């Protein structure tokens, strides 16, 4: 009699499980890049193509924690611009999506603008002004954000420039400097 009850219970469970329609399993996988990159060297402001999956879900791309522009041409191929402030050597690419963040390390040598031309951007202040000094950025487009004011400087014509923005004395402001549309320097500055 004990076996009949066991078989009856199993049969009842099977009937109940077959009576309800199967529920689709909804798995949200985060986009992932594979190490398949064309070539082994790239420079700042160049574009690399990376293979992987779920690239249409990508909302933001970071290279060594620097935000950059990207274009997912398909679900398995994405083009990523190397930001100007990227340090030479191996990079970590972070793909941000609503399904989560994934990081991928690549064996690719980054030859940045700083390495190629010994460029420099310095942020300072004096007499109520925020000063942004540039070195060896001739021919580049410069943009400066001081607090919530945004200032565009067309193409730099000299290798050494001083760009002043009047703020007023004894003010703490955040300064961000963009070269060719890429963030290359930022700092909190107490204007004297």
Image (cartoon, rainbow, N blue to C red):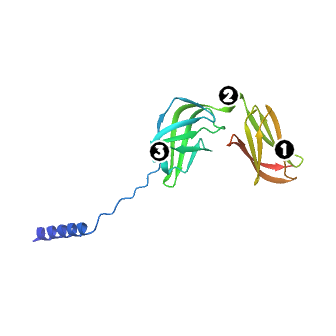
- Rate crowding at label 2 as few (under 14), some (14 to 19) or many (20 or more) other CA atoms within 10 Å: few
Disc with the residue nearer the chain's start (1 vs 2)? 2
Q: Identify the residue position indicated by label 1 in the image.
A: 164
| Residue at the disc numbered 3 | 74
The answer to which of 75 and 44 lies nearer the viewer is 75
Q: Are marks 1 and 3 in contact (CB under 8 Å)?
A: no
Is the residue marked by circle 3 packed among few (<14), some (14-19), or many (20+) residues within 10 Å? some
Tag 3 or tag 1, which sits nearer the N-term?
3
- Which residue is painted at 84% across and 52% down in the image? 167
Check residue 116 in the rendering and tell me which mark sits there, or answer none. 2
The alpha-carbon separation of the residues under discs 1 and 2 comes to: 27 Å
Query: Judging from the image, what secondary structure is the residue with disc 3 in?
Result: loop
Left or right placement of residue 2 versus residue 23 in this view: left
Residue 100 x/y as whole percent: 50, 52
Name which of mark 2 and mark 3 comes first in the sequence. 3
Q: Could you tell me how far apart the alpha carbons at marks 2 and 3 are, in whole angstroms?
A: 32 Å
């Amino acid at each position: 009699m004990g076996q009949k009850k066991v078989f009856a219970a199993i049969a009842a469970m099977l009937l109940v499980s077959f009576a309800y329609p199967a529920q689709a399993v909804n798995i949200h996988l985060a986009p992932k890049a594979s190490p398949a990159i064309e070539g082994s060297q790239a420079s700042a402001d160049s574009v690399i193509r990376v293979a992987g999956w779920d690239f249409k879900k990508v909302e933001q791309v970071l290279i060594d924690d620097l935000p950059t522009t990207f274009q997912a041409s398909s679900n398995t191929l994405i083009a990523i611009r190397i930001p100007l402030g990227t340090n030479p050597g191996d990079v970590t690419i972070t793909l941000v999506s609503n399904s989560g963040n994934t990081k991928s390390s690549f064996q690719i040598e980054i030859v940045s603008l700083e390495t190629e031309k010994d460029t420099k951007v310095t942020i300072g202040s004096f007499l109520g002004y925020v000063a942004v000094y540039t070195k060896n950025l001739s021919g580049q487009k410069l943009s400066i954000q001081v607090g919530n004011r945004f200032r565009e400087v067309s193409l730099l014509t000299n290798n050494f420039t001083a760009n002043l923005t009047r703020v007023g004395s004894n003010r703490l402001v955040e300064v961000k400097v963009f070269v060719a549309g890429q963030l290359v320097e930022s700092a909190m500055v107490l204007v004297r």
